[in-house]
Image: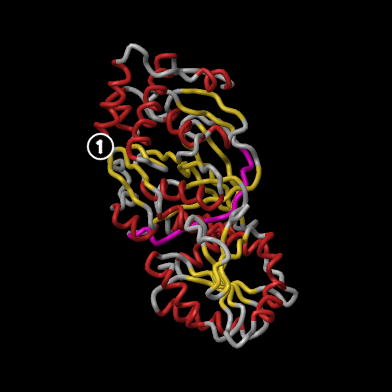
């Protein structure tokens, strides 16, 4: 599977045979990583696939001007595309790459250098992370996230303007009136054939309590209405001012948001802007479905250098749960909420914040339990994480929600941050 293309820049002082012999030393590693050779100098070997990132392999020194011409042709700096320079220990490749990257950064561009070793091998993990970061950045630039209703009134640090999101993350936020959702729900209810129920979801639940079949029908209608909005606005993700459903419809969006996330449409609660960006960012970067939750309790053990955090929310993608039941929404006692069990194992926590969405907090963690305590949102996970990272949540928080994804993705996030902030 082709994951990226690469163009080779080489000095005219080397003849074609020399260039090919040198290039052949590295080609196999690049092919195995998913690379496709697009061009060598002025010779185009395959068409440019603009859906894939283009890396520049600096084969020899004396290629600085040629590389900058290619960067300008691809509009990498203009479009905020990271310039990835592949280098090696011979033929003045590295010093040329350093000069190119210095010029890119003088021109306010982003980029990095990845070196092969003397045997012609690139660090496979590092290259894989760079490929994922480049693809993520390209995907974010094409992403359209719907904000259905304004952010909830209590999100005083999490309701940034669409212009800020565009500048910081490249994506587009689309304001959609909550009244439009209610209009679509009423239109569905007015039809002789109303929205289909969710028999599979109901059948796979361990238990079904407090809520009733009328609540399930409402959840199905909300899901159908949200799917209509997704199609109408060509959305890749959405966040919903869900408590207005409680007030205006005596229902909740918990089940509908869970279903959307499992179908690949990242779906957040409360109109929280940073959290839906984080959910969608993590999917583009890792391919994983994330869960947005409240930190309900954080306790720190300074002797062990660890901390425990209990996070909870009334919705969660069922695909990240080992099992689930269906209950009413915690705060209101209305509608249908997901009461899931999160399997134990490594996870990554993420939070985006800051006035201009310029800050990212992230941490490795482990799920060590999944309680079902009363007095909290229905799906709960008990986490263990490093003391220092937990301290940051208490002393310098970015907001009141965290995003959790399965697995350890710290290296990949670090690679993204290096490019994003370079």
The outermost residue toward the right is 119
> Where is residue 84 drawn, in percent x and y?
53, 69
Of 210 and 95, which appears nearest the observer? 95
> Where is residue 416 drawn, in percent x and y?
51, 61
In magenta segment, residue 353: no
> Where is residue 189 drawn, in percent x and y?
32, 17
- Residue under label 1: 177
The residue at the point 50 percent across, 34 percent down is: 263
Classify 126 as above or below 351: below
Span shown in magenta = 356-369
* SS type, badge 1: loop
Tell me if I can see residue 284 in this picture.
Answer: yes
Q: Residues within 10 Å of mark 1 (few under 14, many from 20)?
A: few
The rendered magenta stretch, by its main secondary structure, is classed as: strand
Of 363 and 301, which appears nearest the observer? 363
25 sits left or right of 354 in the view? right
């Amino acid at each position: 599977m082709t994951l990226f293309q690469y163009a080779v820049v080489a000095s005219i002082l080397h003849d074609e045979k020399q260039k090919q012999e040198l290039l052949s030393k590295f080609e196999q590693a690049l092919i195995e990583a998913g690379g496709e050779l697009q061009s060598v100098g002025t010779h185009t070997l395959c068409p440019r696939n603009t859906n894939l990132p283009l890396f520049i392999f600096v084969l020899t020194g004396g290629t600085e001007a040629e590389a900058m011409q290619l960067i300008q042709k691809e509009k990498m700096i203009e479009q905020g595309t990271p310039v990835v320079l592949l280098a090696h220990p011979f033929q003045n490749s590295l010093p040329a790459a350093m000069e190119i990257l210095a010029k890119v950064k003088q021109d306010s561009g982003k980029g990095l250098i990845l070196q092969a070793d003397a045997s012609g091998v690139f660090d496979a993990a590092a290259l894989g992370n760079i490929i994922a970061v480049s693809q993520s950045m390209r995907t974010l630039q094409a992403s359209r996230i719907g904000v259905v209703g304004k952010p909830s009134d209590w999100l005083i640090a999490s309701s940034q303007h669409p212009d800020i999101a565009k500048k910081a993350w490249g994506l587009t936020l689309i304001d959609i009136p909550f009244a439009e959702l209610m209009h679509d729900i009423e239109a569905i209810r007015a039809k002789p054939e109303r929205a289909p129920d969710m028999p599979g979801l109901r059948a796979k639940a361990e238990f079904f309590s407090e809520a009733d079949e009328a609540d399930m029908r409402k959840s199905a209608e909300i899901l159908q209405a949200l799917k209509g909005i997704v199609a109408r606005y060509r959305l890749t993700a959405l966040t919903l001012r869900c408590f207005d459903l409680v007030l205006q419809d005596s229902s909740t969006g918990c089940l509908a948001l869970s279903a959307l996330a499992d179908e690949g449409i990242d779906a957040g609660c409360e109109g929280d802007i940073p959290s839906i960006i984080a959910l969608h960012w993590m999917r583009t970067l890792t391919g994983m479905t994330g869960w947005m939750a409240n930190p309900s309790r954080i306790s720190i053990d300074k002797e062990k250098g660890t901390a425990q955090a209990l996070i909870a929310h009334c919705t969660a993608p069922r695909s990240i749960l080992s099992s689930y039941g269906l209950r009413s929404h915690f705060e209101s006692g209305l509608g249908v909420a997901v009461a899931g069990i999160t399997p134990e194992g490594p996870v990554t926590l993420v939070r985006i914040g800051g006035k201009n969405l310029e800050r990212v907090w992230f941490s490795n963690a482990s799920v060590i339990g999944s309680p079902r305590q009363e007095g909290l949102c229905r799906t709960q996970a008990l986490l263990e994480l490093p003391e220092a990272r937990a301290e940051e949540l208490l002393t310098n928080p970015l907001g009141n929600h965290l995003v959790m994804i399965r697995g350890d993705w710290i290296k990949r996030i670090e690679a993204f941050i290096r490019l994003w902030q370079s």
